Image (cartoon, rainbow, N blue to C red):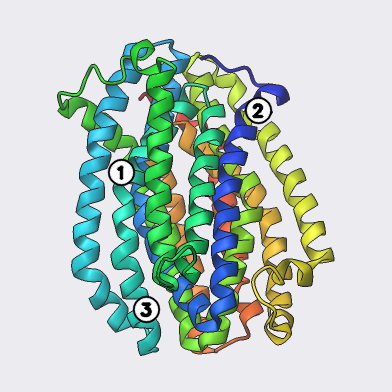
Amino acid sequence: MQFEVTTRQIIKIAAPICLALIIPQINHMTNTAFLGRLGEFELAANGIAGIYYLVMYMVAYGLNNGLQVLIARRAGQLNTKGIGQLFSNGLELGLFSSFLVIAVTLFLAPWFFAHSLHNKQIYEAAVSFIRIRIWGLPFLMMLSMANAFYIGSGNSKVLAVTSLCQEMVNIFCDYVLIFGKLGLPALGLNGAAVASVIAESTGMLVAYSILFGRGFHKRFYLFDYLKPSWQIFRSILSISAPLIVQFLFSIGSWFVFFIFIEHLGERPLAISNMLRSIFGFFGVFTWALSATCNTMVSNVIGQGKEDQVFRAIRKIAGISLLCAFVVCILVNLFPSTILQIYTTDMELIKESIPSVRIITLSTLLMAISGVSLSGVTGTGNTRINLGIEFAAVIGYLLYCSIVVERWRSPLHIAWLADFIYWIIIFGLSAWYLKSGKWKAKSI
């Protein structure tokens, strides 16, 4: 359970995480491609509703990352009972949070969409979609808690299996429910929502089947501490709560960006949904390496090897930048070919290409900045993460409100907001890590 800071170890942790992240992105690309065959309206409505669900998912993602840091720290200390205590209480906390988010969504989402969207048809479609989609959150929350255990304890290979099963079900259900195959009704956009809920429940069942089948529940005492412990809850929330707020700020700002784009019209919103899918697919290398950095930094600190932290971050950032550079070249060589996955409308493709080029350049900056921010997460001082995120989001939203909402700039100029965001993230993350203040943090 103790990691060494080597390229081989980094790849060993990151490769399964990368595969696990690529498979959902392939599903999202397929989902967007299916809806793109229905028309621009479906692409636009899916874009705004999908981003809203992503915002709600950040509660699960924040808990996942916080639990991952804590489990990795206990793994570095070879404390298996501590891992069990964290997992049991994290699972209970996650389920409670997911049902709270469902209640908030069912009551507030229609009001929020009504007061933020200009197109009534997009509003009605988005509300209908999210009322179905949100019921997948408890399954996704349970899956996230299992994934936090697998990554934090050095068993990240399991993620590839669960993701593969989940996305095979998702793609199949997307096809039969969106278009009405095998005698089923054609549900269109809502078919994508139903398919996603079915797939998330499948992924959860596979993850826990492996958990019990391979005896992890016994080796790590995963269900021996189901009696709620307020001390453990506080420990998890002290790390996770700032991350949840951080991710809500991050994706929430993206949601505001998409609302501004909706004000520009249906076509820019449809294009932006395609761009989000492309960005998501090619960003998985950075996200996988960021998760690796998070875990490795926490693990080596748990071993008492603080001197290895900068070496780990530099190595992981270098690999991340290399991956992003290869992606940047490939996408800029074949932008039309990639966009034809989503639509056959050549005018739509032509209008999308300038924004595609902007996004690929921003991934180079994200490759370094994302890893640096995850290095801060790994130190356990997640309140610093929140402060960094807050500053970056303020800069991002100021750009969006002036350049997109007030000036009504072209779409590719709007997407330059990512550069503002990642420059602030990198500058503040590098400053904190070099300050050495994280060395006094104990979790």
- Look at label 2 and name its amino acid: Ile
Decide: is 155 above or below 412.
above
Where's the C terminus, which quadrant?
Answer: top left
Q: Quick one: SS at disc 3? A: helix
Residue 160 in view (yes/no): yes
Q: Position of residue 400 (x, y in %)?
A: 51, 76
Q: Position of residue 137 (x, y in %)?
A: 32, 51
Nearest-to-viewer mark from 1 and 3: 3
List the residue tagged with mark 3.
125
218 left or right of 301?
A: left
The image quadrant of residue 26 is: bottom right
Q: Earlier in the sequence, mark 2 or mark 3?
A: 2
Between 291 and 306, the one nearer to me in the picture: 291
> What residue do we see at 23% from left, 77% from top?
111
Q: Gap in Å between the C-alphas at discs 2 and 3? A: 43 Å
Q: Earlier in the sequence, mark 2 or mark 1?
A: 2
